Amino acid sequence: MRNEFLSGMAFAGILLAPSSVLAATLSLVGTELSLKTEAQATPTSQLFVTSFPASVTVSETSVEFPDVASLFDPTVGVPPGFASSLVDVAIDVGADFLTIDFTNSAPFSLFATGFKNTYVFTFASSVALNITDAIIDTNVTTLGLTDGRVTFSGNELFVNVQSLPFDTSTFVRINLTSEEAVAAVPLPAGLPLLLSGLLGIGLQARRKKAA
């Protein structure tokens, strides 16, 4: 009889818990973001990290990296086949996306060929925890990126542009996804009465067995 009473209480307790999923809304604004580039001729050759890293605070009103070419340090070596310079793109970051604008990329028109010719974006650990994936926005992206060239791992986004052609009209947008927050679901108006009834059934059963 005690077991019947407790089972009624447990069932009521389960139903009383509101349905909710807690997840932070992704926003890079106000967080630190670092950029570097990686160049590697073959999978087994030396990896060169060129010129950077450079760090900025993500802003809603300014372009974080307006002149990537200016970040290059000519004293840093590069692998054979890679130019001692960088394509002059502008990289802008929003709350949950980043864009690469090639307006000022002339006279270049082709990224160097190699195993890696990669932009690497490093996010603050606190915000990186909310990022679940990076997706190419095919509605506006005109650079020949494929899914295998854009990967998110740990707190870093890798965009491998090796051997891709471009011109001054080329544009890239990569959207960052996160877990969606689900609002708490309120209990139906009549549910408290139902729970009272279930509890009453448990008490009644106990009294009958005791009689």
Image (spheres, rainbow, N blue to C red):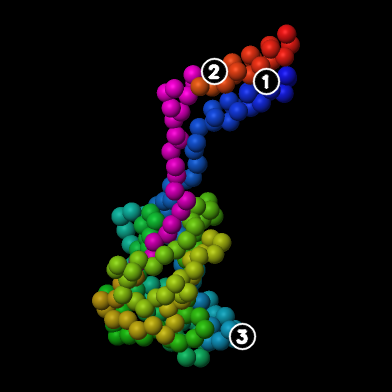
Identity of the residue drawn at 63% across and 14% down: 204
Mark 3 surroundings within 10 Å by alpha-carbon count, few (fewer than 14), some (14 through 19), many (20 or more) = few
Measure the alpha-carbon separation of dots 1 and 3: 68 Å
Asked whether disc 1 touches disc 3, contact meaning CB atoms under 8 Å apart, the reply is no
Q: Nearer the viewer, mark 3 or mark 2?
A: 2
Query: Magenta stretch: residue 177 in it?
Result: yes
Find residue 5 and name its label: 1
The residue nearer to you, when weighing 84 against 179, is 179
Which amino acid, by three-letter code, is at mark 2?
Ser
What residue did someone put label 2 on?
196
Measure the alpha-carbon separation of dots 3 and 2: 70 Å
What residue did someone put label 3 on?
44
Q: Is residue 19 above or below residue 143?
A: above
Query: Magenta stretch: residue 129 in it?
Result: no
For label 1, the SS is helix
Q: Nearer the viewer, mark 1 or mark 3?
A: 1
Rendered location of residue 24, percent (x, y): 47, 45
Mark before the other along the chain sequence, 3 or 2: 3
| Quarter location, residue 112 | bottom left
Which amino acid, by three-letter code, is at mark 3?
Thr
The residue nearer to you, when weighing 183 against 187, is 187
Q: What residue range appears in magenta?
A: 173-193
The residue nearer to you, when weighing 97 against 13, is 13
For label 3, the SS is loop
Badge count: 3
Measure the alpha-carbon separation of dots 1 and 2: 13 Å
Q: Is residue 73 above or below residue 28?
A: below
Mark before the other along the chain sequence, 1 or 3: 1
Mark before the other along the chain sequence, 1 or 2: 1
- Quarter holding the N terminus is top right
Does residue 168 appear to the left or right of 36 in the view shown?
Answer: left
